[in-house]
């Protein structure tokens, strides 16, 4: 990707209404810290859930350090706890986390980071950093939001994961606390405001229906894989609807006339 020397001025995240106005650095930092701290504390729930699912302290901490995408981590340990095949559980977590690659395509254009920094920054491309970065009006604000959110969340998430894993035994039956729902709840809270078009909402709704309908009949982790089919199905149906014959053209009227 070619380096960009100036923030884009077209419509979009950096060119939204008011994009040509500066946002104080302090306001960006405040917003980023709010998201980073609020979500970072939920790492405690992952640590407890992972330890309660039978993963060791080292395995639990390695997931947070190396995977660092909460929804995928919860999906993995949840599938393992339900007795699912580890390979199926890993595949489900992988496909759930692949959304971050699409986030990265957009963020790479907005941030325009130096090439040697990009491999490190890619590890922080997650729901929360994307949610904070996209609305920023300038490239400087976007970089500050991404960096502060990523750093705060990474440090807190890993510290609270360690604390949760160490304190899991003190809580007793971890399933009774319902902590495994914390990660998915955070993911849905961040995702819901981004579903603005009818196509996006229908796709999300169909994916939910597929997961709920297939949970009783497929092994743990497999419903997440199948739910990915919602996107191509909706796009196919949407394409068929838009490419159908134009019923408003009257007989004997040339295309483009009588509209």
Image (tube, rainbow, N blue to C red):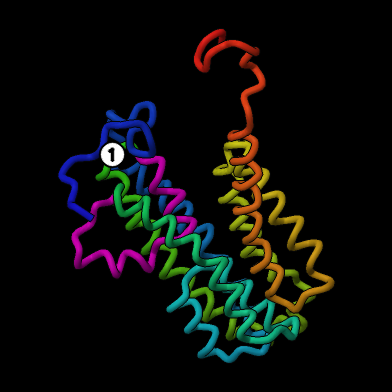
User: Which segment did they paint magenta?
Assistant: 111-136
Q: Nearer the viewer, residue 259 or 156?
A: 259
Which residue lies at the image location 37% right of the left edge and 50% below the top edge?
106
**Seen in the image, is 254 located left or right of residue 76?**
left
Q: Pinpoint residue 147: horizontal percent, then vertical percent.
A: 32, 57
Q: Pinpoint residue 117: horizontal percent, then vertical percent.
A: 23, 65
Q: Pinpoint residue 86: horizontal percent, then vertical percent.
A: 63, 86
Q: Nearer the viewer, residue 83 or 136?
A: 83
Quarter of the figure with residue 14:
top left
When the figure is inspected, residue 202 is found, relative to residue 166, above or below; the finding is: above
When the figure is inspected, residue 258 is found, relative to residue 97, above or below; the finding is: above
**Identity of the residue furthest to the front in this view:** 252
Considering the numbered disc 1 on the image, is that residue within a helix, a strand or a loop? loop
Query: Quadrant location of the C terminus?
Result: top right
**Identity of the residue furthest to the right in this view:** 216
Q: Which residue is mark 1?
A: 138
């Amino acid at each position: 990707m070619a380096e960009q020397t100036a923030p884009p001025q077209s419509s979009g995240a950096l060119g939204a209404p008011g994009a040509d106005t500066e946002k104080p650095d302090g306001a960006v930092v405040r917003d980023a810290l709010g998201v980073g701290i609020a979500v970072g504390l939920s790492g405690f729930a992952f640590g407890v859930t992972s330890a309660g699912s039978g993963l060791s302290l080292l395995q639990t901490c390695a997931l947070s350090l190396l995977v660092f995408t909460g929804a995928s981590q919860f999906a993995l340990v949840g599938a393992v706890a339900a007795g699912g095949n580890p390979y199926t559980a890993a595949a489900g977590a992988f496909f759930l986390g692949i959304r971050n690659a699409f986030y990265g395509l957009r963020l790479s254009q907005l941030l325009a980071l130096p090439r040697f920094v990009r491999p490190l920054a890619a590890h922080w491309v997650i729901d929360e950093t994307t949610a904070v970065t996209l609305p920023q009006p300038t490239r400087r604000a976007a970089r500050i939001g991404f960096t502060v959110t990523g750093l705060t969340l990474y440090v807190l998430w890993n510290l609270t994961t360690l604390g949760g894993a160490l304190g899991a035994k003190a809580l007793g039956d971890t399933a009774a606390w319902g902590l495994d729902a914390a990660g998915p709840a955070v993911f849905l809270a961040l995702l819901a405001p981004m579903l603005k078009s009818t196509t996006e909402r229908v796709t999300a709704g169909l994916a939910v229906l597929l997961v709920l309908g297939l949970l009783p009949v497929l092994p743990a982790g497999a419903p997440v894989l199948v739910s990915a089919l919602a996107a191509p199905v909706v796009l196919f149906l949407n394409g068929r609807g838009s490419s159908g014959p134009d019923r408003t053209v009257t007989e004997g009227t040339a295309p483009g006339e009588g509209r």
